[in-house]
Amino acid sequence: MNLSYISTRGIDTPKNFTDVLLAGLAADGGLYLPETWAALDTAALKGKRYADIAEAVLTPFIDGTIEQADLRRILGETYHGGGFDHPSVAPLVELKNGIHILELFHGATLSFKDYALQLLGRLFDHVLTRSGQKITIVGATSGDTGSAAIEACKACKNIDIVILHPKGRTSDLQRKQMTTVDAPNVRNLAIEGTFDDCQAIVKTLFSDETLRHELNLSAVNSINWSRIAAQIVYYVSAGVSLDKPASFIVPTGNFGNVFAAWSARRIGLPVQSLTLATNRNDILTRFFETGAMTMEGVTPTISPSMDIQISSNFERYLFELMDRNANAVRDFMAQFKISGTFKVPDAVLKKAQTDFHASRCSEAETLAAMKHCYDATGYILDPHTATAYHAALATKPPSPVVIAATAHPAKFPDAVKQAIGLNPPLPDRLAVVMDKPERFTVLSNDADIVKAFVRR
Ligand SMILES: *Cc1c(COP(=O)(O)O)cnc(C)c1O
């Protein structure tokens, strides 16, 4: 028997790792979690290469559903096969003021999303080759996820990928990272509408049962368990490289990356404290202050990848917080859907506050944090990472402090310029996309037209 994965809503039948990989969301609307958390001897991993730490972390989760030799080869190819431009893969850089930056921008598209998606693409391809299936991945993007998913799938024989972006509403750089990829299985669609229109079209496609089965539609959004599992690895790699348990601070949107940090602690990584940083869209910080999860509108910020209304991955933590009571989770989620709010009892809030600290950061504070860091240390932060730097200064957690740097500053040149008056140097990987020819198809904001295109 392999390790089972169960749904946070408790109705779906248990599945193994590869089933959960392909399914993404559980059929009952819940998210998958392992039925038990294995314990990892993290001390034994000090000094090991990234792929070896990944193998130690991931093997109990995969639990025999992928041959060990195949897993080892896939991890070597993913992390040491040229896809990441730093030998440590996720280097830990100590700044002059004692704060450590965990640089998660050494992958193809310069955000942390490459670390999980590069592996996910290869795992998908491996499993699909075994089963003789082909799938079509369809997704909408406002920025980082689309390019990371395209880079991850462009070499996959069994995957076609179609990414919708709102025409003229992404940055030039973000669009070019998607549209300059020259691969026959990649299609970019520029939709004449907003990001919400793109998302609505994708939803319509997925709700068409005929199309879904005809093309084996699949998604790679952050509710996929394998993305969380892959993200645990860099927390372990950073944690074991330090002499003392670290205080981690993670810029947060969908609660995925910070849940990976929580999971690293859950399997045995000694951690001093865990802080989530939000921008002015602070639904999560309000939860950790009051115990109430209450939806408000989203305000656009200079850290756009954290501009969220609902943190989908929070449901995983809620399930753990409620001692894995799926009925309670179902009730909370039903209340939230109907009224836009739910509240946990005070005793549960107290427990949550021992797991996480939370910090919010206004636009002015984000810019000030970027300037403070540059003036004090010469290091240029991207605006997402800056919200975590702000938390470090504001809450002063015990050292060593480790900040997850979720993107390279060159991806957000306007915010950097505004904060420190300089254009961040463009890494080679970004410089090359600037002059390459773009390939995309403009379609009107109409689900039927997109459907016809995807069929062709
Ligand atoms: C996606 C993203 C985030 C938010 O990560 P979550 O896992 O959704 O919390 C933060 N920063 C950057 C740069 C991102 O691309």
Image (cartoon, rainbow, N blue to C red):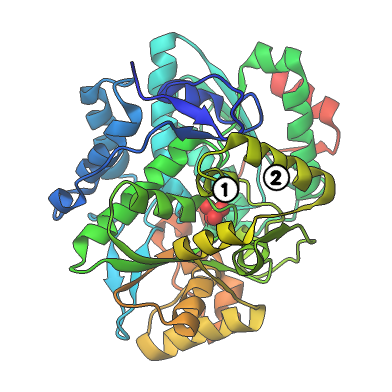
Locate the C terminus and report the quarter of the image it occupies.
top right
Return the x and y of residue 300 as percentages of the image width and height.
73, 66
Of 292 and 47, the residue lying toward us: 292
Q: Quadrant of ligand 1?
A: bottom right
Q: Residue at x 40, y 59 (%)?
A: 428
Q: Mark 2 belongs to which amino acid?
A: Phe
Labels 2 & 1 near each other (Cβ < 8 A): yes
Q: Mark 1 belongs to which amino acid?
A: Leu
Gap between marks 2 and 1 measured at Cα: 9 Å
- Of mark 2 and mark 1, the one earlier in the sequence is 1
Is disc 1 surrounded by few (<14), some (14 to 19) or many (20+) residues within 10 Å?
A: many
Locate the N terminus and report the quarter of the image it occupies.
top left
- Residue 62 lies, with reference to residue 143, above or below; the image says above
Image disc number at residue 71: none
Return the x and y of residue 144 as percentages of the image width and height.
56, 52
- Res. 53 image quadrant: top left
Q: Which residue is mark 1?
A: 318
Q: Which residue is mark 2?
A: 332
Q: Is residue 201 left or right of residue 118?
A: right
